[in-house]
Image (cartoon, coloured by chain):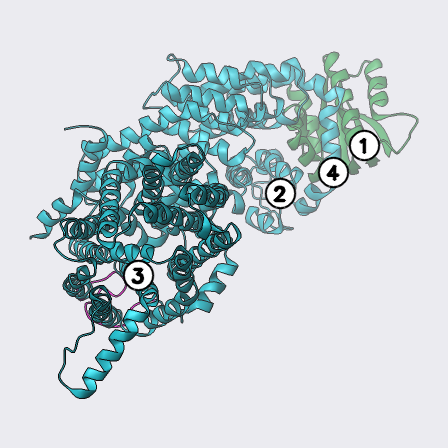
Chain colours: A green, B cyan
Amino acid sequence: MVITTREQDNVVIFDIDGEIRRTDTVQETLHSLVEAQLDRGRRNVLLNLGGVEFIDSFGVGQILASYISTQNLGGKLKLCRISHKLLLIFQITMLHKVLEIHEDCDRALASFGKT
Amino acid sequence: MPDGRLERFLKRFGDVRGREARAALSLSAFFFLITFTFYIIKPVKESFLISVRPSWWPYADLATALFIGFVVALNARLLDRMPRRTYLTASLLFFIASLFAFWFVFDVHQKSLVTTPVSDASGILFVLWAQETILNHWTIAVLVFSFWTDIFIATSVTQFWISVNDVFNPHQAKRLVGLFVTGGLFGGIAGSALAALMTFARIIKPEDLLLVCPALLVLALVMVNLVYAGPRKASGTAGDERIGPPARVGYRESFRTFRRDRYLLLLAAMLASAMVAGSLINYQFKTVVKSVFEYDQARTSFIAVFFLVILAVSTVFHLLTTGRVLKSYGIRWAILVAPAFLLIGSAAVFVIPFGALLAWAWVVRGGDKTFDNTLSQSVRELLYVPVAADIKFRAKIFIDMFVNKFSTGLGAALFLSLYHIRRFAYREDPLAVVRETGIVVLVFLALWLVLTRLVYREYPAVLKKDLGQLWKPGQTVVDEHIDERLVREVFEAIQSRERSTTLYYMNVFNLVRSNSLTPELKELLGIKRDELKARAMDSLFDVGGEVFFPGLEETLSDTAFQKEVDLIFLLPSYQKIMDERLGDIAASDSEVDRIEAANSICRMAPSPSTLEALARLLQDPSPEVALYALNSASVHRRPEFVPLIVRQLANPMTVAEAQTALAAYGPGLEGLLARTLRSADEPLEVRRAIPDVLARIGTQKAADSLVGELALRHDDMEPYLIEALYKIRADRPEVRFREKELRPELQVLIRKACDVVLSPPGPPGAVQAQLDIRIRRIFDLLTLMYPREDIVNDYQNILQGTPKSVDYSLEHLDNLLDREAKELLFPLLEDLPPGERALRLKKALRLK
């Protein structure tokens, strides 16, 4: 998994490539990266999952933990370009009712300005 | 006499119905004339036989035992080969001719005179030779006459019962057996009365009685021809054509039939032991009579009076007791009466004084004959009922003629052995002879008693043997072929596709997780590769049209995928988010949101907020939301949900799912359900839905609750309670029902069915429909008290079986039910005209 962080329109965008799974031991998890941005005072986070091939429950847990941390600080965490498979998981687990998911990252970015 | 009046007249003697009357009367008259003739001949035979030396008595019986087999075979062959009517006519003519011949023989002997009745020279020589021979061979003449008498009665009685078999089916015959036996008894009384009167008043000599008989047999001939001139059950046509089983029936064939059938073997053994005992009792009787009466006239007169009294007592006993004993106690106890009485009576010989010997002989021999003519006769016929017609045909011939005579022969051999071993010829004291014979009698009576038990134990099994299940109960058929829950889930999945893709995925995922997604179902659900068109995803992706989800099937079927989804539900972060958000979703204005929430809760951990949301969803005004919530409640099974689920029982849209949810709680819920069941405050719909839940829980406590509720006799609950109890009986054989508690309820159900007949609720069609429902409930309840499979088979065969299987079912029930139940239930089950049915029910209910 490779995570690249960039910033646009006051939104921290995490472009994630590869797979998010517990077997891929990395120094920094998605949640720790998000928390680092939150510690820097960033409150709007967009997870671009367009390059994610697979995500397991660990990965979903990372997204949810990031969501909670952001939410606790009054921020917003949104998702864009998720795969059919991940959407299916979110639908079955009802997370699509909680998480804000956009097909297109530009529209997701635009939505931060609206809220 | 018109049929109606004739039927009413005959009803005094038996249960005669409709068009049976004429045939029944003809057969009764035939039997009357046969026994009339026999009881004129019998005292003469007995008296002449007693007059010879006692060592000859057994030879008379042995001769019968040895040679009767040939006659049996001949009779069977002729019955099989010749037209029945022709054969019966011929045999009666033979007996008429024989009577004249025997009269001539005895007349010559008694007059001790050689005469020349013809003038022709060759004729004179022959007659002189014959007369000389008779005078010198009296014992032989008596033995031949005795043998002829046995042939006469054995052949005639068999022919009579075969005629009954030709004309009536077994159940008819069972009803009419009383009438026939009555006819036979009256014939015997008339015959012995005539013989007693003539000899006692010295009007004619004993041998002259034989000249009365041919006239009676001519009348019997007329009756036989009347019987076979009328319609019969087998062909339904009149005439003289051959009737009877097509198979060749001979002695060997009859024996083979027996060898293969344990029940028939036991039956034959029982009858044989009874016959041996009876035969020895007869020797005891003869010994006593010979010692008391020296002259033919007095002896014949005594024997005729003896038979007269025995038959009179038999008639009274039969009219007053036989039917009642059979109705009240059934075969089970009726079969015991005769051997028990004779055992006690025979044992008494060891304590009575010499002076009481004639009275003792009268009582014991009289008792044997009385039971033989009445109760034992009826019991014997009933024991044949479960035997298939063709086997019965052979069995009757074998038992009535071979076993019967063989046993008599065995009795004779035993007496002969005793006679020589114990030197009876030199004994002055008849009491000693009678007592020594009595020891052997007691052995055979004890054997008889044991065999009655064995026969009775086999009887119901034989009855049931030919009663198969005609169809499977509806629920069984459904359970065998359809998984109701799966069908419901598939339909929910199909319907949910129109409503929400998310809900659809959830439902499909549920199907996948329960391993129910077969290739056929995938086809039906349209989730095969590249086929899915998920319109609801439009809103999510805003693509303005339908989108495809290639690979859905593979994704959902992937066990790694399934495992990850399960793990997500367990994530602390997931639970934390849902704790915060689920309440809002459950309170959403969107019905789809609430349905999705209700659906997914079944996979969530039971945190307080999850359960709170579920409680809210269980009370949702939308039945669809409630349906999914009920499913989730059945997974979490929290006690606090029970009242909310019970409330859903009142809604026809959710009642089935609510029942399933409550049943999922399993044992432990019976008390609460029983209280709800009895609560007058609960809506009737709720109370009616509870028995099914208790049935699904299926514990002893659940069954007891249902029986307790049934005892309260609320009409509006009755069908639901009985159906539930039936279900428990079918699914949980380990659950026990107490007959004592159910018997009164059975009576109530039967009486309600009687009310349908006696106070018809509408037109005949409606009455029958009501009656059918009532009878079904009665049988459902009977399954709780008796072996379920047997009762179901009885019910099905009575409803749609062949006439034979209907008979067997009724007979099986006859042996199962108590008298009170039978009296009311049988008129409802039997094929009766409405008026007749109502009349019998009124009689049973003691209504005017």
Check disc 2 and report the residue beneath it: B516
- Eye-nearest disc, 2 or 4: 2
When the figure is inspected, residue B95 is found, relative to residue B590, above or below; the finding is below
Check disc 3 and report the residue beneath it: B162
Mark 1–mark 2 distance (CA, rounded to whole Å): 39 Å
Q: Main SS type for the magenta part?
A: loop
What residue is at 22 percent from the left and 44 percent from the top? Answer: B15
Mark 4–mark 3 distance (CA, rounded to whole Å): 79 Å
Residue bounds of the magenta highlight: B229-244
Asked if the magenta segment contains residue B243, the reply would be yes
When the figure is inspected, residue B806 is found, relative to residue B835, above or below; the finding is below
Residue B70 placement, left or right of B300: right
Check disc 4 and report the residue beneath it: B561
Mark 2–mark 4 distance (CA, rounded to whole Å): 17 Å
Check disc 1 and report the residue beneath it: A15
Q: Which callout, 3 or 2, points at the residue further toward the start of the chain?
A: 3
- Residue B592: horizontal and vertical position, in percent? 53, 28
Outermost residue, right side: A27
Q: Secondary structure at mark 3?
A: helix
When the figure is inspected, residue A48 is found, relative to residue B799, above or below; the finding is above
- Residue B467: horizontal and vertical position, in percent? 43, 50
Outermost residue, left side: B1
Q: Secondary structure at mark 2?
A: loop
Q: Amino acid at mark 3?
A: Ile
Q: Amino acid at mark 1?
A: Asp
- Eye-nearest disc, 1 or 2: 2
Mark 3–mark 1 distance (CA, rounded to whole Å): 102 Å
